[in-house]
């Protein structure tokens, strides 16, 4: 079974930083795409950032437009962990953040969600 444990959310003032972590246990497809989503109040869940791992062991990243230049996604394959470094946070970044990792069984697994609140 796959379990994901998220940590690092909290309350921060605008302009501040937070680092989210998502640690996986179980049969994770370590060569798959690891991603962070968020769900803002009264909004649909949206993709924030993702990171791949190619056969050459390098990675490529994707960022949603409003977080480009402020957020950085990274991964530690040895630890089956994905991170989201969030800098220059804005009140509109307030949301519940979820990680999503692929399992060896072909399913996507989701973390429990961590609340990020940015005060103005």
Image (tube, rainbow, N blue to C red):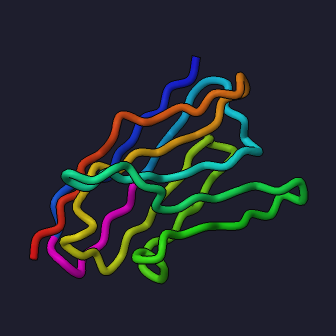
Give the magenta-colored segment's residue range: 13-20
Residue most toward the right?
Answer: 56
Task: Residue 94: name its quadrant.
Answer: bottom left
Instruction: Out of 44 and 1, give the one closest to the viewer.
Output: 44
In the picture shown, does residue 99 fall above or below 67? above
Q: How far across and down, in percent of the image, does residue 57 sit?
A: 83, 58
Residue at 43%, 66% (x, y): give it. 85
- Which quarter of the figure is the N terminus placed in? top right
Residue at 31%, 80% (x, y): give it. 88
Drawn side of residue 8 relative to residue 15, left or right: right
Residue most toward the top?
Answer: 1
In the picture shown, does residue 39 fall above or below 74? above
Residue at 44%, 50% (x, y): give it. 21
Task: Residue 30: name its quadrant.
Answer: top right
Q: How far across and down, in percent of the image, does residue 93 sit?
A: 27, 67
Magenta stretch contains residue 77:
no
């Amino acid at each position: 079974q796959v379990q994901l444990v998220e940590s690092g959310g909290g309350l921060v003032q605008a302009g501040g930083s937070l680092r989210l972590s998502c640690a996986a246990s179980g049969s994770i497809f370590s060569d798959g795409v690891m991603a962070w989503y968020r769900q803002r109040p009264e909004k649909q869940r949206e993709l924030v950032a993702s990171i791949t791992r190619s056969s050459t062991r390098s990675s490529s990243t994707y960022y949603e437009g409003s977080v480009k230049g402020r957020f950085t996604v990274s991964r530690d394959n040895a630890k089956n962990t994905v991170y989201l470094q969030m800098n220059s946070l804005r009140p509109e970044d307030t949301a519940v953040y979820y990680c999503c990792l692929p399992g060896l069984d072909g399913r996507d697994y989701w973390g429990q969600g961590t609340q990020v609140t940015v005060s103005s």
